[in-house]
Image (cartoon, grey):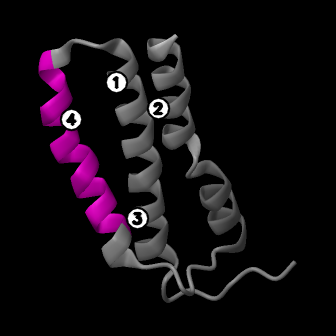
Amino acid sequence: MTKWLGMVSAVCFAVCYLPQLIRTYRSRNVDGVSTVYWTIVVAGYVTGWFYIVPFHDRWLYVTYGVGFVCAAAMLAACLLFRDRPHRRR
């Protein structure tokens, strides 16, 4: 039961970035989004990866991997769209 709860929690944290990513890439609006924050999140995932490697746990690899990709995509959006005009709906 504990492992199941841990897996659900890990998946939630790994995919929680998706709504913001989708909204940001559609609108190209990064006003109010901190590049420093996303840089720290990406650094956290990179250093966290070195921490989890010895555990040989696929779920940790997958969730850290998905979380890293999402955070890196958000950081890329911040850098790409910070000086561009927004899309109007």
Residue tagged 4:
49
Residue type marked 1: Leu
Crowd around label 4: few <14 · some 14–19 · many ≥20 (10 Å):
some
Which mark is in front, 3 or 2?
2
Image quarter for residue 87? bottom right
Among the two numbered marks 1 and 3 on one chain, the one whose residue lies closer to the N terminus: 1
Q: Is residue 85 above or below residue 48?
A: below
The quadrant in which the C terminus is found is bottom right
Residue 42 badge? none
CB-based contact (under 8 Å), mark 3 and mark 2: no
SS under mark 4: helix
CB-based contact (under 8 Å), mark 2 and mark 1: yes
Residue at 31%, 76% (x, y): give it.
36
CA–CA distance between discs 4 and 3?
18 Å
Residue type marked 2: Ala
Residue stretch rendered in magenta on the structure: 38-54
Residue tagged 3:
75
43 or 8: nearer the eye? Answer: 8
Among the two numbered marks 4 and 1 on one chain, the one whose residue lies closer to the N terminus: 4
Crowd around label 3: few <14 · some 14–19 · many ≥20 (10 Å):
many
3 or 38: nearer the eye? Answer: 3
Residue 24 x %, y %: 63, 67
Chief secondary structure of the magenta portion: helix
Residue 34 x %, y %: 42, 79
SS under mark 3: helix
SS under mark 1: helix
CA–CA distance between discs 1 and 3?
22 Å
Which mark is in front, 4 or 2?
2
Residue tagged 2:
10
Residue tagged 1:
60
Residue type marked 3: Leu
Residue 49: within the magenta?
A: yes
